[in-house]
Image (cartoon, grey):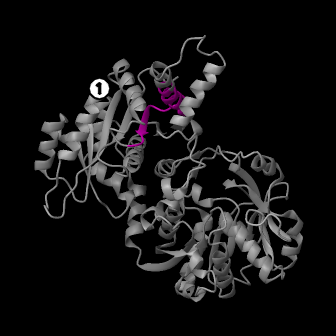
Amino acid sequence: MALEGHKYIFVLGGVMSGVGKGVATSSMGLILQQRGYGVNLVKIDPYLNVDAGTMNPTEHGEVFVLGSGLETDQDMGNYERFLNRDLGPEDYMTSGMVYQAVINRERALGYNGHFVEAIPHVRDEIMERVKSAAAHNGSRISVIEIGGTIGDFQNALFIEAARVLKVKQPEDVIFVMVSYLPVPGTIGEMKTRPTQHAIRELNSYGVQADFIVARASQSLDDKRKEKLAIWCNVKPDHIISAPDVKSIYDVPLNFEKDNLGDLLLDALKLPKDVPADLSEWEAFVGKMRNAEKTVKIGIVGKYFDTGDFVLSDAYLSVIEALKFSAAEVGVKAEIEWVNAKDFENDGDVEKLAVYDGILVPGGFGQTGIEGKIRAITYARENKIPYFGLCYGMQLMVIEYARSILGLDKAITAEIDPDSEHLVVDVMPEQKELIAGGNYGGTMRLGVYPADLGEGTIAHEAYGSASIEERHRHRYEINPEYVDRIREAGLVFSGTSPSGVLMEIAELPKSEHPFFLGTQFHPELKARPLAPHPLFSAFLKAASEKAG
């Protein structure tokens, strides 16, 4: 259990979803960590899925895989990026996880035959998980984001658990409401009433907000702060202005301008002995903002069916990894979305000529596959730097087998399990799971080691002979074809320690400036202050092509 006197900050959302709770939570965690405090961040998702692994990325955003292999919400990615460290499975929970644990305990007579109810049993399970996360991390402060919006039926039990914790430890728990203040175009005035209603809704749960993070298109003026303070019963200096910014990485810097770190520590009754040192963070933001040279990167993807507003969330970690490495290389990455479907049925693949680099990210299923393969062929033949991630590597190997080995029917078992040339096949241990309909949490997930070959692009980028990277896939390069592909010139520069699984494929620099794919997801380990070496190598090659 957490130490006595452990501090908890609960972050809740008001008015609408997508208001920025995750970024606010990450920013508070960064600020408090830089003040010398051990901090752990927890994401609570109120959906009944046991984890995020089976959800469509166009509906809920990307699935972020922890080092443990747990498939989580994309906010966990922001947490890791801001704190610059790995998080564990104890830092994430869903309603599904909580209910599953309670039901399993009931089935094992863990409640001694008593009837089991949402209150107290489910509520208490939530509280114990929050405390266990703090104990496991050995932190001093926990910042817990409760997903959803005030008024949602789904998150009421989590708010109730936070309320009870506040009752039991009144000096150790505070609540931060992240709310939205609209500025209707026809009126031209910032409106506080929606946030007032959200605060009153929160009051109906028995909870009073200690802070309001006021999201808006522009900064709050004193008049708006005064109205919120009076009608929401929150101190004026506890109302933090959070206007729209060019980059989410500006948010902690803006929070510090409003002395949020000092205010939080005062509210938690903790010493303010160490000033926040955000100099490295500020330097990173400066590099992002001040880069003069631009490289144009085309991401050839498939998740376009629900519009561009959701698309960026589907590939969030890839986008951020490109930004981090661009800052390190000293360029600005201008990212454009390219629909792979456009290249099917003899679509104009030559429009890819405008890009300095082409990236094919991970994905599942048949949609857009032939379009992606045509894009890969174009990148290889025209010496455009190419970076393939997971499915992007598998399709790269398939393209090479078709074009260079002449295996016209080369394909993955995911698309055509009866094909003559399954260059990419399902892992044997996965076949039983698929046959039984077991899809959730059953892929090759989490961190696995790999050995790198000397003299390769991968070895040069990492500067190491062995690495550990995060995976999320069922299919592998078929060992039966590896020797033939190698003899044809494609280098498998990264393999599992056993040599059976192909982790990185590339062409030598003598043949192509950068033509490389990874079976793993390097974007999951990219951080603002620790860019991923393969993304940086890709951006350097793209910068050289840009001239």
Task: Identify the magenta region.
Answer: 126-148
Give whichever of 54, 64 is nearer the camera.
Answer: 54
Q: SS class of the residue under badge 1?
A: loop
Provide residue 10's location: percent of width, then percent of height. 37, 35
245 over 160 or under it: above or below? below
Q: Is residue 244 left or right of residue 300?
A: left
Residue drawn at (77%, 60%), measured in percent from left and top?
476
Give whichever of 82, 390 is nearer the camera.
Answer: 390
Give whichever of 358, 346 is nearer the camera.
Answer: 346
Specify the quadrant of the image occupied by residue 98.
top right
Q: In the rendered image, is residue 469 in sight?
A: no
Specify the quadrant of the image occupied by residue 13.
top left
Provide residue 315's location: percent of width, then percent of height. 53, 62
Residue 34 forms part of the magenta stretch? no
295 over 446 or under it: above or below? below
Mark 1 sits on what residue?
206
Q: Is residue 7 left or right of residue 422?
A: left
